[in-house]
Image (cartoon, rainbow, N blue to C red):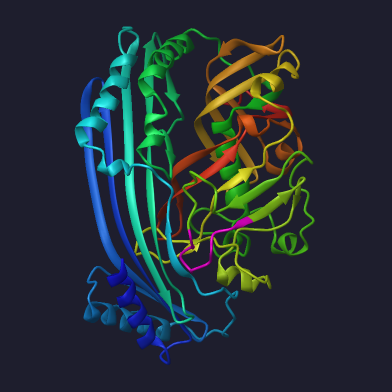
């Protein structure tokens, strides 16, 4: 990485005196995806990109250009293009950027064995074994096993003295069985839906899932769902499993607290937020009950939103967003933080590859563990007729992150402090502050873990980002269920 970093450092040095600020990012991404379906290899896909993105500021206007010609002449042409674009922008008052200490050093994601270094045959054998273990019952119409591995090298330099490098190592896997009977079709997944459980970790993360060992249970539950009664509509106490709660946090807290949305700078693609800039400035908005404390943490082990520095050179750190149910901060980059008068960026500037500008993206936004013990402890403390909902099936939320509706693969009735009758087509709906205000218990550290989400979309042109959410099962009162 020394050669790209040296090139970037020399490049931004030539930008001094030609603009108010310049930064250059080198990103080399290598990613492979495998998929097995019904006993056959369905997909083996490999992608590799490398290049440099250059962002400059002239007065108050930004210019950005990217190139895969990582030579001094190629970088100079991209710098000239970025400068020309900034100078062509309508003149706006020059506003300050939130201050940052120059980023220097090298950061490596903790991992034991890079999954990309595991032979292809070994990775496929793991998936085929899990797929085979899900088949046998004639009602199982489709079995799937998927695996992803990625390695991302980055270098960053700026006219403020930043010169740093980092290495990200990511992987994950999952299985799913789909059963068909009569007019019903039901799918069951493990460890989570929508592509499996991803993490910033090595092959040891995939091996620990023991996919083949869980496969028979996954298939049996898919078949069981075919004859389970449909969840009736009503209002119930619900306990959300960790994976479902992770998506709840992602959609109704993480996106709602992105400061560019709050400042109406991200409205055309994925909406704004019900939270106002004044709410962030005052830090007194009631977001949920006293059981709800939520933190953005770019240092979380296994987190897909973990890094040494964000794509503006801000060091990864923890930011309490909601403390005892009260809003305290938002997710920001240097521009949005300064516009709100904040002392520092929350370190949430992230870009999808070298050819996109950094925008405000979540780091790892997690609900802090509570005092309700294990899931068994929480169920034992929950009244008969409540529901346990787990594994996301679908989601919908409005442009202000206010009204939402989620579907789950499984709903089970709580009876006698244990899990009882199974329902198919679980679902629930609510309004963000009312829902979080109804939370009266969160399980403890023994039930808490990070859940990776690999397909978060935002921006125009669109950018895909990976992020994790730490959760433990939690209980919510008087929730509308059976809505889909």
Q: Quadrant of residue 50?
A: bottom left
Horizontal side of 438 relative to 249 (left or right) equals: right
Q: Is residue 312 magenta?
A: yes
Q: Is residue 90 above or below residue 125?
A: below
Left or right of 469? Residue 319 is: right
- Which sits in the foreground, 16 or 138? 16
The image shows a total of numbered marks equal to 0
**Between 198 and 444, the one nearer to me in the picture:** 444
Residue 209: quarter of image: top left
Residue 310 in picture, x, y percent from top left: 49, 62
Is residue 440 a member of the stretch shown in magenta?
no
Give the residue displayed 60% in from the left and 16% down from the top.
Answer: 412
Q: Which residues are magenta?
A: 308-318
Residue 263: x, y in percent?
62, 65
Residue 457 x, y percent position in the rendering: 45, 50
Is the C terminus in the top left, top right, bottom left or bottom right quadrant?
A: top right
Decide if residue 57 is in sight here.
no
Q: In the picture shown, does residue 223 fall above or below 80?
A: above
79 shown above or below 230: below
Q: Which residue is found at the position 34% from the left and 55% from the top?
A: 152
Residue at the limit of the structure toward the front, as seen here: 112
Quadrant in the rendering for residue 236: top right
Considering the whole magenta stretch, tell me its main secondary structure: loop
- Which residue is at the front of the view, 166 or 443? 166
For the residue pair 394 and 344, the one nearer the viewer reads as: 344
Residue 114 in view of the camera:
yes
x, y (%) of residue 463? 41, 56
Q: Identify the residue at image location x=43%, y=45%.
A: 200
356 shown above or below 467: below
Q: Quadrant for the N terminus, please.
A: bottom left
């Amino acid at each position: 990485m020394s050669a790209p970093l040296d090139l970037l450092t020399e490049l931004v040095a030539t930008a001094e005196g030609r603009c108010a600020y310049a930064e250059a990012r080198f990103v080399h991404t290598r990613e492979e995806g495998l998929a097995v379906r019904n006993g056959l290899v369905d997909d083996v896909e490999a992608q590799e990109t490398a290049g440099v993105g250059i962002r400059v500021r002239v007065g108050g206007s930004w210019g950005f250009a990217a190139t895969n010609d990582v030579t001094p002449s190629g970088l100079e042409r991209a710098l000239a293009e970025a400068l020309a674009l900034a100078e062509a922008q309508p003149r706006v008052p020059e506003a300050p950027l939130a201050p940052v200490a120059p980023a220097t050093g090298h950061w490596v994601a903790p991992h034991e064995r890079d999954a990309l270094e595991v032979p292809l045959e070994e990775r496929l054998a793991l998936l085929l074994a899990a797929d085979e273990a899900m088949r046998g019952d004639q009602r199982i119409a489709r079995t799937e096993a998927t695996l992803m591995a990625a390695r991302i090298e980055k270098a960053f330099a700026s006219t403020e003295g930043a010169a740093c490098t980092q290495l990200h190592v990511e992987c994950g896997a999952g299985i799913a069985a789909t059963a068909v009977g009569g007019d019903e079709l039901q799918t069951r997944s493990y460890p989570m839906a929508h592509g499996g459980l991803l993490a910033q970790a090595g092959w040891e993360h995939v091996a620990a899932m023991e996919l083949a060992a869980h496969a028979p249970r996954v298939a049996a539950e898919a078949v069981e769902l075919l004859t389970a009664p449909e969840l009736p509509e009503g209002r119930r106490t619900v306990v959300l499993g960790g994976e479902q709660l992770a998506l709840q946090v992602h959609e109704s807290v993480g996106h709602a607290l992105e400061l560019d949305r709050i400042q109406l700078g991200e409205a055309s693609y994925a909406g704004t937020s019900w939270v106002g800039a004044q709410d962030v400035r005052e830090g007194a908005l009631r977001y949920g009950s006293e059981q709800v404390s939520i933190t953005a943490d770019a240092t979380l082990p296994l987190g897909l939103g973990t890094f040494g520095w964000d794509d503006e050179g801000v060091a990864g750190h923890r930011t309490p967003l909601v403390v005892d149910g009260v809003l305290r901060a938002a997710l920001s980059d240097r521009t949005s933080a300064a516009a709100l008068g904040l002392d520092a960026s929350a370190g949430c500037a992230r870009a999808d590859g070298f050819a996109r500008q950094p925008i405000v993206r979540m780091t790892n936004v997690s609900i802090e563990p509570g005092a309700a013990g294990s899931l068994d402890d929480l169920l034992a403390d929950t009244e008969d007729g409540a529901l346990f909902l787990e594994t996301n099936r679908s989601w919908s939320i409005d442009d202000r992150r206010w009204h939402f509706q989620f579907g789950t693969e499984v709903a089970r009735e709580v009876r006698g402090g244990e899990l009882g009758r199974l329902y198919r087509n679980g679902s629930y709906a609510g309004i963000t502050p009312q829902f979080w205000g109804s939370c009266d218990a969160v399980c403890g550290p023994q039930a808490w873990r990070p859940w990776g989400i690999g397909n978060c979309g935002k921006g125009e042109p669109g950018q895909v980002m990976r992020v994790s959410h730490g959760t433990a099962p939690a209980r919510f009162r008087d929730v509308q269920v059976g809505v889909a």
